[in-house]
């Protein structure tokens, strides 16, 4: 399940994506816009800044902005940064692999084989879905409701 921290990170990135090319946004404005606790958001934004996803400017007119275009920030990158492995089992993770303690024949494990397929399908979607895609999807959904 997607953690609240990752969901907040994605929501903040969408706010910053809509603001892309403008002045940096203050944390309090992002927090208010998405109803995210300010202290929690500060930690999340700092983590994303340290990873190079965001840029921060101090002082008057300061705040956060995307360090690259919203088209170039993908969900897989954000999820791995905030929560670590995307795979549902450690033995199928590409970046955080660990063998299962109880498994004696990994190559012949039906559970593992199935969850490799699940991982691949999830990664296909997450690698292809950018912050810009989410922003556009939200616009489409809002238009269909009106």
Image (tube, rainbow, N blue to C red):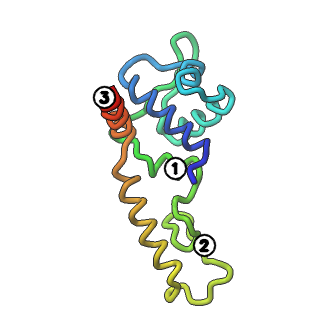
In the image, is residue 127 above or below residue 144? Answer: below
Return the residue nearer the eye: 103 or 110: 110
Quick one: SS at disc 1?
A: helix
In the picture shown, does residue 120 fall above or below 40?
below
Q: Where is residue 41 in the image (x, y as percent from the top left)?
A: 62, 31
Using the numbered discs, state the Cα–Cα distance from disc 1 to disc 3 in whole angstroms.
Answer: 28 Å
Badge 2 is on which residue? 98
Tell me if residue 61 can be seen: yes
Residue 16, numbered label: none
Q: Residue at x 47, y 38 (%)?
A: 53
Give whichever of discs 2 and 1 has the lower sequence position: 1
Label 3: few (<14), some or many (≥20) within 10 Å?
few
Give the number of the mark in front: 3 or 2. 3
User: Which residue was labeled with disc 3?
Assistant: 143
Indicate the quadrant where residue 123 lies. bottom left
Q: In the displayed image of the protein, which residue is found farthest to the front?
A: 146
73 sits left or right of 78 in the view: left
128 vs 61, left or right, is left
Classify the position of the C terminus by image quarter: top left
- Label 2 and label 1: CA atoms lie apart by 19 Å
Residue 64 in percent (x, y) is at 51, 25
Residue 79 image label: 1
């Amino acid at each position: 399940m997607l953690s609240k921290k990752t969901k907040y990170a994605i929501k903040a990135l969408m706010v910053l994506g809509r603001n892309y090319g403008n002045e940096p946004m203050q944390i309090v404005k992002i927090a208010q816009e998405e109803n995210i606790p300010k202290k929690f958001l500060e930690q999340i934004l700092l983590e994303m800044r340290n990873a190079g996803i965001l840029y921060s400017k101090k002082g008057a007119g300061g705040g956060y902005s995307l360090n690259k275009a919203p088209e170039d920030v993908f969900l897989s990158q954000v999820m791995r940064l905030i929560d670590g492995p995307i795979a549902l089992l450690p033995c199928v993770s590409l970046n955080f692999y660990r063998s299962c303690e109880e498994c004696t024949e990994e190559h012949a494990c039906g559970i593992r084989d199935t969850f490799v397929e699940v991982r691949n399908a999830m990664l296909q979607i997450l690698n292809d879905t950018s912050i810009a895609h989410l922003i556009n999807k939200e616009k489409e959904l809002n238009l269909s409701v009106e």
